[in-house]
Image (cartoon, rainbow, N blue to C red):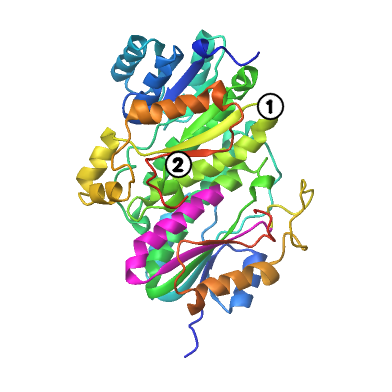
Amino acid sequence: MKSSPEESKVVVVTGATGGVGRGIALACGEAGWHVWIAARREKEGREVAAEVDAVGGRGHFVSCDVGDIGSATAAIETILGHEERLDGVVHNATSGLSPVPVSLADVPLADFQDHVNVALRALDSLARASFEALKASQGSLLLMTSEAGFEGKAKLSPYAGVKGAQRGFARALAREWGRDGVRVNSIAPLASTPAMERAFEMDPAMADRVLGRNPLRRLGDSTEDIGRAARFLLSDDARYVTGHTLMVDGGSCPAV
Amino acid sequence: MPAPRPLLLASEAEEMARLARCLDAEVRVLPPVDRPDTFEGWRTEILSIEPRKRIVVSLWRSAEPAQDIVELDGEEWIRRFEAPYLLWNFALGAAGRLCSDGGAIVAVNQAPAALDAPGRTPELAIADGVFSLVRSVAAAEGPRGVRANLVTTPIGLVDANLIAPSPPLDGFPGTIESHVAGAVRSFLSEDAAGLTGRVLSADGGRSL
């Protein structure tokens, strides 16, 4: 199977009921793609699927709790039961603990495990479940990592750690899957999202720190800034791009 | 005044005994990597000792066959990635808390260069995760003068059948004595007083 015409691409986005995931879903919808919203919350997921329809794509919902073993695999199997192809898998979901400030020496095992389950175990499951379909479509896997994965975070260390690990996963898998024509990339976004707003509430000085070093002096829009960059990496325009982490952060991260 | 002996928090492995000899370090053994149920207890115990000025952390793993991710089942993924990565979180968290003001922490991690990454996705994921954790410790503990840096080595992970090009320096992948210990000593010393959140890839230039 050759790479599909742009208007008929089929992609799945985890954690797409809001924030960056929703933005990626809508940006892909703008291109007329079939977009599967893989998430726990069905009502919100179907609402985003309807928004995808409204912007010109075809939205679908598939139940997926990426923190549960087997759920990510089952979601991919469900999608492949309905679609003839799969061109892109976007792993965007992140642990609900991500914005919670904590000292690394105080984190209980269960909390570390939650970060690892959502960020990496689900990613491993998604990769293994989707590989044959992506190979057939000459598609790509896209990870939503973070600037935290480059520079670390004093108060968000477990989150920073798994985001770094995702980057290593992508760098290795790009070299493993390249021989089969499957691309693997990452985006480190800085966006205005409900999660970012919660983080600002928990750490009021964070807003000054985040925007003070940002050359563009604003947070990115989830659809127009982040989503469209993701769509580029999923599209045939990026067919020679793999193993790359694209910083879509307004030039914010100085550690790259 | 001579520098105090470093404390080495390390796996029970022959390579770690050699590193301890090179550094003249006191050794405290990390819990077994396959026993996550013991990690919290180990952390409580290690945090009950006196703070130390110089701490080296290394979770040493034995060689694994290169294996594509699609061939790894879930149990293998947990064994090769999750268990060691979780232990790294505990070890570095404890080191950050245990290090006294103005002290130095050095993590030593086995990491494949990107060229050698195929078949070693779990190991490169751990490597980049540990890199980010070390930088997090550097950011968290820096205000009280604690530095945190990282030395990486391919020893035990990658040693033969390298794809071209060859590493710039002969002797790949090196030894603990010739390649790793000196890099650790450099980061521990006052000569590195202005360095934190940095990584030295002691790999003969393989990761260039």
Instruction: Say few, some or many: other residues with alpha carbon within 10 Å of mark 2 (under 14 / 14 to 19 / 20 or more).
Output: many
Tell me if A219 is positioned left or right of B118 in this view.
left
Say which amino acid is labelled 2.
Val
**Residue beneath the point at 41% across and 11% down:** A57
Magenta region, residue range: B126-155
Quadrant position of residue B167: bottom right
**Residue beneath the point at 33% across and 23% down:** A17
- The label nearer to you, 2 versus 1, is 1
Q: Which mark is residue A116?
A: 2
> Residue A13: where, in percent of width, then height?
43, 24
> Residue A194: where, in percent of width, then height?
26, 33
Number of numbered discs: 2
> Residue B89: where, in percent of width, then height?
45, 54
Q: Which residue is mark 1?
A: A180
Real-space CA distance between mark 2 and mark 1, rounded to the nearest whole angstrom: 28 Å
Point out the tag, 2 or 1, that comes first from the N-terminus: 2
Magenta-colored stretch includes residue A54: no
Q: Give the overall secondary structure of the magenta segment.
A: helix
Instruction: Say few, some or many: other residues with alpha carbon within 10 Å of mark 1 (under 14 / 14 to 19 / 20 or more).
Output: some
Residues A176 and A233: in front is A233
Question: Is A231 above or below relative to B87?
Answer: above
